[in-house]
Image (tube, coloured by chain):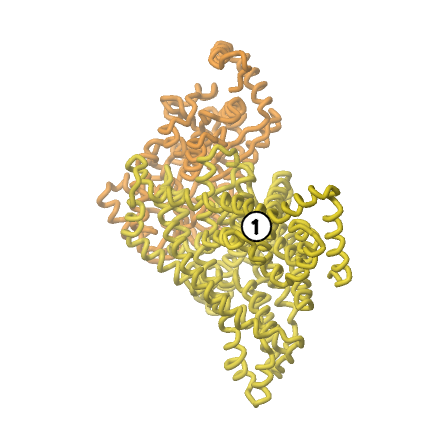
Amino acid sequence: MTSSAELAHEIRSAGREQAASPRDPTIATLWSRLAAYQTLLLAAVLIVVLAALVLPPFVFLLKASVVDAQRGGEWSLANFEAVLGSRRFLITSANSLVFAAGSAVVALGIGWITAWIVERTNTPLKPLAYLTAIISLGTPYILYVTAWLLLFGKAGPINQLYRTLTGTSDVLINVYSMPGMIMVEGFLWSPLAFLLVGATLRNANPELEEAARVSGASTWMTIRRVTLRLSLPSILALAMLVFIRAIEAFEVPALVGLPGRISVLTTDIYGNMVAQAPPDIGGASALSVLMLALVLVLLAIYGRLSRHAERFATITGKGFRPRPFDLGRLRYAAAGILVLNFLLLLVLPIAMLAWVSLLPFYQPVSPAALALVTLDNYRTVFSPDHVGLIANTLLVAVATATLAVALTFLAAWLAVRRAPGGWLVERLATIPLVFPGLILGIAVMQLFLHLPIPLYGTLGILIWAFVINYLPYGMRYSAAGMLQIHRELEESAEMCGASPLMRLRRIVAPLLAPALLAGWLFIFLMAARVLSLAILLSGPRSQTMAVTLFDLWTNGQGTELAALGLIWSMLMAMIAAVFYMLARRSAASALART
Amino acid sequence: MRCPRWVPCSVVAVGLSLAAVSARAADAALIDAAKKEGEVVWYTTQIIAQLVRPVSAAFEKKYGIKVRSTRANSTELSVKIINESRAGKPQSDVFDGTSTVVPLKKEGFVLQWLPDPAKAYPAQYKDPEGYWVANNLFFLTPGFNTALVPKGTEPRSYQALLDPKWRGKIAWSTSPTSSGGPGFIGTVLTEMGNESGVLYLRELSKQRIANIGSAAREVLDQVIAGEYLLALQIFNHHTVISAKKGAPVEWITMEPVTGTLSVISVHKNAPHPNAAKLLVDFITSSEGQNIFRDAEYLPADPAVPALTPSLKPDEGRFRTHFFTPEQTEDNIVAWKKVYDDLFR
């Protein structure tokens, strides 16, 4: 952290450097005039860049949705009529909503319980919860989903155990069902829910709980009447976030829903794009526009909820750690929950993948299958092709994170400092939130198939789409960090004669570095594992890891998938650990500064 | 084709076709030109681990030309190639599949060209207009898990599939091709006629067949794992490949078996036109066909016998319904509609 003395020195020298450069007095006036325009110029450039990134996908998607391919490209609403007129649309929309709502409840349920145990009680074994959450941040969803299917599938160890115990040939859990889909999607989001709920619980005012306890309320009553009530707005906002993400989810509907004959909006859109030649781009686009509208409404609700949540959170921020609840004997039960969470979300899926990665073909866990164990999959996986693949993925993720953070650093500065044009910059940088990954993929593909820019089939098109997709996340990190830097630091630099760009470089950027780094790593980790956005954009020369893992699954190379996925996840888990440490430190330093 | 700036391309083309009169000389010229291109992009429907890897490795070893491959099913490949080609940005040089070529031929994206080895192939294994040539034969039929279904109790006829004991225990691929649910429906409708065919399928839909959104290979793998007991419309040679490694799986000769061809073509605007021709030439040559054979695939070259001859109708004595790429493509929309109505 920068000390205040260092900061003062930095402010003065920034001013001196600026003042020293132009000697001639006329140039100096010119320079100061220019400095006045620097902010305007920056805003103008950013508006142009962001608009060029963000707006064309909307235009192309809307255009594709109103072009009737059957009548020679005439403009009409036929695509919408076809979609809205079918019973299927009602069923898939209903499925999407049920699936998303259920997933939000499961994710928040698991996340809240584990977060409360970890943040508020004297339960042992707390590090298990963090370990689970951190490793899950680096694991591609497609890998997780295949692992849980191996675990909960009809031939998986859980159903196998049930059959051995009861002697029936039935299954205890039919994972290829709506409850199964909800369970798996809920599991996927619960680690993130845990981290975010944990943060709100840490920030919530412990005095109120303390007061309840002093007044003689039991632990349960304190939770019910105080803790839950206080965190309700932020939990609702989080639930909404998971709900929106689950509406847009692709992995679980494709791998778990389809075999159980449950279709949702995303799987139908994907089906329209790939399941017939020539593809029904009009139908897929119309469905996408409808889905976009749905997400837009949901996001508006989310916006209202989270504004509310922040109001609740800002009452807080006292400088002492709350006294944890003493659960007595119950703390072993609570530790049991943490262990179960650790087993279900981390140990068992990894163990299943490790088992399968050692086999030439899937076999249930059994002593007989031990005879088949081989390292062949690992031998195949360590090939030059896969080294190139890892390099591709890292390149895309690094470029995406760097560009998105650089753009949103400037955008956040303009927005938070209420510079002219700042409002528009902020809108442009956050609007891609409405795009589900798959739909943004379709839109960007259309765009580059029609434009004379040779990006199609290269890593460039992936980076282009990824930057659009992650702008809102970059904005969230940068703006949150920017809000914590008081204006007066910049004002004093300005008094010393530093131009806006100089202030950005010498004052704001160094202070914001921890938040920017945390944002960079978050985007890096997301970009390294996203499937839905990449699946339609990657070509033979531009594969990413998540797409390759999905391909391995669809192409019947499930055991190779396990080997490759495990190695990749180990690499990503290390990066995720760095992310977590930085995020904690930046949160801690932010707290120290306020 | 890349031509020097001062020579019109047509002149070079005429020159090349004159050179083609002497076959050996053309080969050497083709190899040289292909080597200069350095790589070839193969959009394939074949299973990478089983076939594409050994074929690519042999080709790379022989010519030093890198093979890049992407796998998807026939329909997905057509879609991808149409998208790219319409935009004037073709990425693929060579593509294969049971019906990939047909929509592409209609759009004019296929090179009218057959490799020399195709001359020795029977007429039904190549396009009369010269847009495609077969590289292997496929026979699609059910397979079952021999550890969970005692031999002799497996369903041996279409009617036997309706037995309630199989409810929830059958899987197939969603692939809108001959190796998915729609392909199975196609064979049923062809065999039983539309009316009784649909009646049968309506009964079959009560079995709640699991739709797996992946290749038939993965469906068979899930049967081997015990997730399901029966897989419909899987490739019979895949069961032999797995059984050789010790997997508990066998195929069932459920007559009529679906027969198709995997055919291969060169893209009309291939970025690497010479390497593309060289790869197709290699795959259809006896050298390439022997790699197919060693991988337990059923070579199209009549001079290369299968490693397990009983996988083929004559030697295995089973009846088939045979579909050409055009027949599959012409009917797949109707078959997929039945599939969507009854099974999705």
Residue lying at the far bottom in this picture: please name it.
Answer: A216
Q: Can residue A320 be seen? A: yes
Depth check: give the residue in front, A562 or B201.
Answer: A562
Q: Position of residue B85 (x, y in %)?
A: 44, 31
The residue most toward the left is: B195
x%, y% of residue B304?
A: 48, 26
Q: Position of residue A312 (x, y in %)?
A: 53, 73
Which residue is tagged 1? A527
Circle 1 Cα neighbour tier, 10 Å, few/some/many (<14 / 14–19 / ≥20): many
Is residue A397 visible in the rendered image? The answer is no
- Relative to A530, is B294 above or below? above
Q: Residue at x 37, y 25 (%)?
A: B124
Chain that the image shows in orange: B
Q: Nearer the viewer, residue B268 or A551?
A: B268
Rendered residue at 22%/44% (across/down): B195
- Residue A138: image location, x then y, percent: 60, 55
Q: Is residue A548 above or below residue A487?
A: above
Q: Is residue A3 above or below residue B205?
A: below
**Chain in yellow in the render:** A
Q: How many marks?
A: 1
Residue type at tag 1:
Ala
